[in-house]
Amino acid sequence: MAKDFIPFTIPLIEEEEKKEVLEVLESGWLTTGPKTKQFEKEFSSFVGAKHAIAVNSCTAALHLSLEAIGLQEGDEVIIPTMTFAATAEVVRYFNAKPVMADIFPDTLNIDPAKIESGKGKNWTEGKAKAIIPVHFGGLPCDMDPIMEIAKRYNMKVIEDAAHTLPSSYKGKMVGTIGDITCFSFYATKTITTGEGGMITTENDEYAERMRIMSLHGISRDAWKRYTSEGSWYYEITAAGFKYNLTDLAAAVGLAQLKKAESMYLRRRAIALFYNNAFEDIEEIEIPDTCESGGNENHLQHSWHLYVIKLNLGLLTINRDEFINKLKDEGIGTSVHFIPLHIHPYYRDTYGYAPEDFPVANETYLRMLSLPIYPKMTDSNMERVADTVKKVIKRYRK
């Protein structure tokens, strides 16, 4: 294996993050406190949302969102099968049913037509309480038909925006479209706090409920009880969770948020470079930049992931072998995602077969994610592209 390995991703941590963290360490206040509140305020301003609630993961954000809308045992929630475990497992926390839908073959986002056609077959009007569209790789879903379906059948829309900052749909920032939006600040994401997440909403009632439930169901601003502003007295108003974000993590987030736009521009530049490098190679399908169609239809892709799809009929090796060949040449990759319906738990619990969602199943077998992160140098991205082309040439039929 090559010594100078290019990993799939590395977070961009610089002096600004270190300075913010040191400030917190020297303050003596490490857990949820003033830095977390500042992070919430600056994040809500960044995306244009009325409320922002900082939590310790996007999984926590999704769980709190479903609790806030009143999800109950036996209810149904519509999700894409092409997503990470968290999107479905939070539904199971309520002993409710995650109802899966297939995806578009090009964007890899949930197909609204498949949501509609699943009515009466996969999901039941009255029992289906929410749709969780996942903005795959940083590309916003087609939200207009999703919002229309939700309105028609009295469902809430909780956006899984783990990949999607900053992104916009037809002039609206992701974080301001659905009833609730959930972001991730995991180590690989477009901005990071190591572990962490954020919830945005315009709904006052949802925001208040999620704030309380994120910290043991204790009455508002419980963190202040150890400061000069607070009191020792508190009341538990509900059986809540331990989902709060620490000031240490928020400090990193504040520094990262200030660089969100510049980091996005670097990821976009890498994506466009890859597209230009691969556009004439028939063995590869490149992602759509979605930069045409005029302002009224414009989508801003955050480029959290750069996913290529192999035309395996033109190659003598499969996707897994292709990944191993890249690894042998010192290039790290990943696969996003193994569709949920073929994982043992969901397959066995709900009786799914791979062919139940044919687009996701076929796409999964030929997709892989290439390195794309702001810390990449020009020589890094050139080497990735050259190595992909080298492997293609070597194993072309």
Image (cartoon, grey):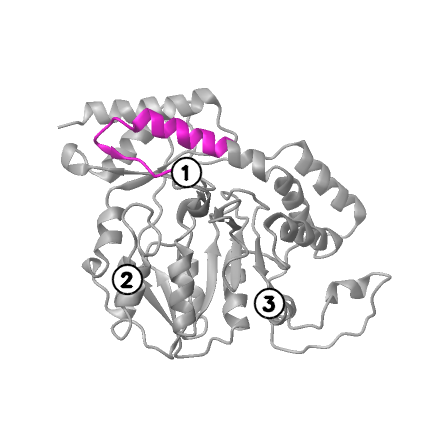
Decide if residue 345 is in sight here.
Answer: no
Q: Nearer the viewer, mark 1 or mark 3?
A: 1
Location of the C terminus (image quadrant): top left
User: Are the two marked residues, 1 and 3, in contact with CB atoms closer than 8 angstroms?
Assistant: no
Image position of 281 with respect to 134: above or below: above
Image position of 67 with respect to 277: above or below: below
Image position of 366 with respect to 237: above or below: above
Nearer to the camera, 382 or 116: 116
State which region is magenta: 266-289
The x, y position of residue 125, in whole percent, is 34, 77
Label 2 secondary element? helix
User: Are the two marked residues, 3 and 2, in contact with CB atoms closer than 8 angstroms?
Assistant: no
Q: Residue pushed farthest top?
A: 379
Q: Residue at x 36, y 46 (%)?
A: 336
- Within 10 Å of disc 3 (Cα), the crowding (few <14, some 14-19, many 20+) is few
The x, y position of residue 33, in whole percent, is 74, 56
Label 3 secondary element? loop
Q: Residue at x 28, y 62 (%)?
A: 114
- Tell me the residue that label 1 is attached to: 291
Q: Is residue 269 magenta?
A: yes
User: Are the two marked residues, 1 and 2, in contact with CB atoms closer than 8 angstroms?
Assistant: no
Q: Residue at x 18, y 37 (%)?
A: 312
The x, y position of residue 20, in whole percent, is 71, 41
- Tell me the residue that label 3 is attached to: 203
- Tell me the residue that label 2 is attached to: 114
